[in-house]
Image (spheres, rainbow, N blue to C red):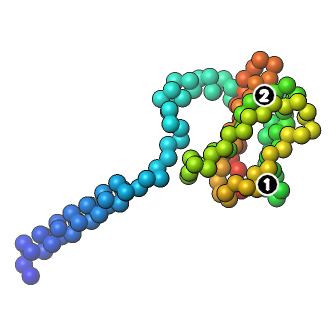
Amino acid sequence: MDWGKGIILTLAAFAVLMLSMVAICVKQDDIHLVTQNYYEEEIKYQDQIDKMINASQLDYEVLSFDGQLKIIDLHLPAGAKGTLHLFRPSDARLDKKIDFDIKDTDVNSIDVKTLKPGYWRVKLSWTENGKAYYHEKKINI
């Protein structure tokens, strides 16, 4: 074999490899964005930063996870209202949002045994006495 045939075979193999990679990428349909409206979320991010600062100034832990019992406990005072977002980064179809209104401080547990095992982000946003808060925790179920 001479140099010309070797170069042509190498270029042909490279082209076949690139075309197959493009075909594989085009066929993927399970690509999930973090959020569908990320432009609007980016514009509102200063509000999110303010909520995070408010939560960091609290003198108690608002969210805890028990890995053995697979329970998320909310340690919020009565009158707090908000949303608990169970966010699965690898598959948006598994996400869950739970609205809550704390009336009794003794009953604030959420059972997560039914969730698919793996990495989750728990995003807690709530209002209390007219002030907005946000706290995020990473858990592994």
Residue 138 position, x and y percent, is 68, 47
Q: Label 2 neighbourhood size at 10 Å, few (<14), some (14-19), many (20+)?
A: some
Residue 25 position, x and y percent, is 36, 56
On the rendered structure, is 5 left or right of 24? left
Q: Secondary structure at mark 1?
A: loop
| Quadrant showing the N terminus | bottom left
On the rendered structure, is 33 left or right of 117? left
| Quadrant showing the C terminus | bottom right
Residue pictured at 53% horizontal, 41% vertical: 34
Residue pictured at 37% horizontal, 57% vertical: 27
Residue pictured at 21% horizontal, 69% vertical: 13
Residue pictured at 62% horizontal, 22% vertical: 47
Task: Classify 22 as above or below 100.
Answer: below
Q: Label 1 neighbourhood size at 10 Å, few (<14), some (14-19), many (20+)?
A: some
Q: Secondary structure at mark 2?
A: strand
User: Residue beneath label 1, please?
Assistant: 70
* Type of the residue with mark 1: Lys
Quadrant hosting residue 84 = top right
Spatial CA span between label 2 and label 1: 23 Å
Task: Classify 120 as above or below 48.
Answer: below
Q: Earlier in the sequence, mark 2 or mark 1?
A: 1
Task: Classify 95 as above or below 124.
Answer: below
Depth check: give the residue in front, 49 or 128: 128
Quadrant hosting residue 121 = top right
Residue furthest bottom in the image: 1
Q: Can residue 136 be spotted in the picture?
A: no
Residue 81, which numbered label?
A: 2
Residue 90 position, x and y percent, is 56, 52
* Type of the residue with mark 2: Lys
Residue 78, which numbered label?
A: none
Q: Can residue 13 be spotted in the picture?
A: yes
